[in-house]
Amino acid sequence: MKLIVSDMTCGHCRSTVEKAVAEAGGTAAVDLERKEVTVEGLDPTRAAEVIRAAGFDPKPA
């Protein structure tokens, strides 16, 4: 599923989101230009929770 994370701005943001999703058991592909995160392996609620816990504000795409 895709989430919009408009407050990602740099490579550090990308790695923080990818690491948070990986630690929760999923995988994340981050597109900084589009401010999109594609998450696999987690349900949408859990994906949003872990991204929020990492300090970002995910929205449904």
Image: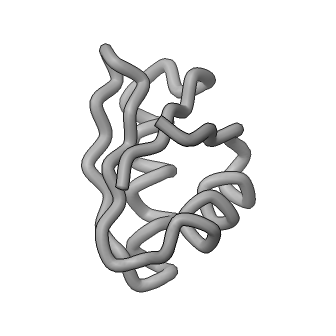
* Quarter of the picture holding the N terminus: bottom left
Q: Quadrant of residue 54?
A: bottom right
Judge from the rendering whether residue 32 lies leftward or rightward of residue 54; answer left or right: left
Q: Residue at x 53, y 65 (%)?
A: 44
The image shows residue 40 at horizontal and vertical percentages of 30, 68
Q: Residue furthest top?
A: 33
In this rendered view, identify the residue nearer to me: 43 or 57. 43
Judge from the rendering whether residue 50 lies leftward or rightward of residue 17; answer left or right: right
For residue 25, above or below residue 57: below
In this rendered view, identify the residue nearer to me: 22 or 44. 44
The image shows residue 51 at horizontal and vertical percentages of 61, 55
Q: Quadrant of residue 46?
A: bottom right
Q: Residue at x 38, y 32 (%)?
A: 36
Q: Quadrant of residue 19?
A: bottom left
Q: Residue at x 28, y 30 (%)?
A: 31
Q: Residue furthest bottom?
A: 25
Judge from the rendering whether residue 38 lies leftward or rightward of residue 45; answer left or right: left
Color theme of the render: one colour
The image shows residue 28 at horizontal and vertical percentages of 32, 57
Count the marks.
0
For residue 2, above or below residue 8: below
Q: Residue at x 33, y 78 (%)?
A: 41
